[in-house]
Amino acid sequence: MWIYLTGNDGLPPIILYDYQPGRAGNYAKNFLEGFSGLLECDGYTGYNSVENVILVCCLAHCRRYFFEAVPAARRKKIKLLDINSPEEIPEDAADPEKAKEGKRIPAEIGLCYCNKLFRIERTLKAMSPEERKNKRLELEVPVWDSFWSWLATVEPLGGSLLEKAVNYAANHKELLGNYLLDGRCEISNKRAERCAKSYATGRKNFLFHDTVNGARSSAIIYSLVETAKANNLNVFQYLYTLLLYMPDYKQEPAGVEAMMPWNDFIKERCSKVMDMETETPENRGQIPL
């Protein structure tokens, strides 16, 4: 199940699930044909086949490798927080210099560098894209410079989890910094990860898809529900409204547009309590086109 999200560009958010029979890069290439710009993703090499894009590697994935290299007993005490977590990353967990002075192991120091960048990002959330870009260059570039200088001194054991973390970071050095090119770009794609979690949670209940059509239908439903949630709609009321109007308007482009989650007609109907008893096919009224 492939998941695509629109970026942080001030336009209404869209979340699309796309079932494909595999994870070859060509599926992303075909889906994103005609798109150009910044494409944020993990380090999977399949995304290299997407044309006319600048790849942006997610910092959360890089941090995860350092986290996994921390011994299990210490990992239990660590929370992987990000800029949207209700709880802020503690200052002592985002201070690599203090970690070095305390002779913490390299995996913990790498984790502190990543946390420091997330901690700074949290203070930039309310800024305009241009302001955010300028502040990133001022505050975060020095952190990256220090991180790369430190990383060059780390000599992990061959085959260790730390070696995996160091190699991942080094191999994606340019891509990890590409978010600095545009203030609309996020430092990680945790939003997409949360959408993947929604699907994984549902999968625990329905266990599997036994037909391709079933998987594609599931992708459509998840796209509708997650996009409605992202636009702050009451999901049940939105689906009810679609079922109420779509049969008669599905051939009318203006009618389909009127049922998009960001349309005023939908926002008016699906952002407050709806009287379900009076909202029936017989007296539903017309969509204002």
Image: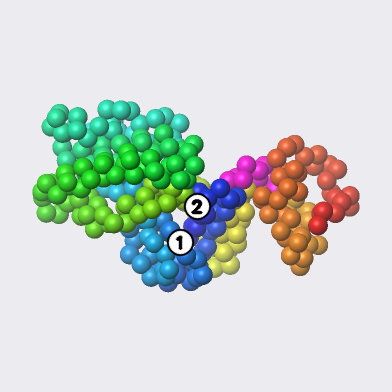
Query: Which mark is on residue 185?
Result: none
- Disc 2 crowd, CA 10 A, few/some/many (<14, 14-19, 20+): some
- Residue 249 position, x and y percent, is 78, 62
Q: Nearer the viewer, residue 236 or 98?
A: 98
Per the image, the residue denoted by label 2 is 7
- Residue 5 position, x and y percent, is 51, 54
The label nearer to you, 2 versus 1, is 1
Q: Which residue is found at the position 39% from the left and 43% from the top?
A: 134
Decide whether residue 232 is among the magenta residues.
Answer: yes
Q: Quarter of the image holding residue 112?
A: top left
- Residue 208 position, x and y percent, is 50, 58
Q: What span is colored magenta in the figure?
A: 229-238
Residue 187 falls left or right of residue 35: left
29 is higher (above) or lower (below) than 145: below
**The C terminus lies in which quarter of the figure?**
bottom right
206 is higher (above) or lower (below) than 73: below
Per the image, the residue denoted by label 1 is 37
State whether residue 126 appears in this view.
yes
- Residue 96 position, x and y percent, is 22, 35
Mark 2 vs 1: CB contact within 8 A: yes
Residue 122 falls left or right of residue 221: left
Q: Which residue is found at the position 30% from the left and 28% from the top?
A: 91
**SS at mark 2?**
loop
- Disc 1 crowd, CA 10 A, few/some/many (<14, 14-19, 20+): few
Q: Nearer the viewer, residue 281 or 152?
A: 152
Q: Nearer the viewer, residue 110 or 221?
A: 110
**SS at mark 1?**
strand
Q: Which residue is found at the position 35% from the left and 54% from the top?
A: 178
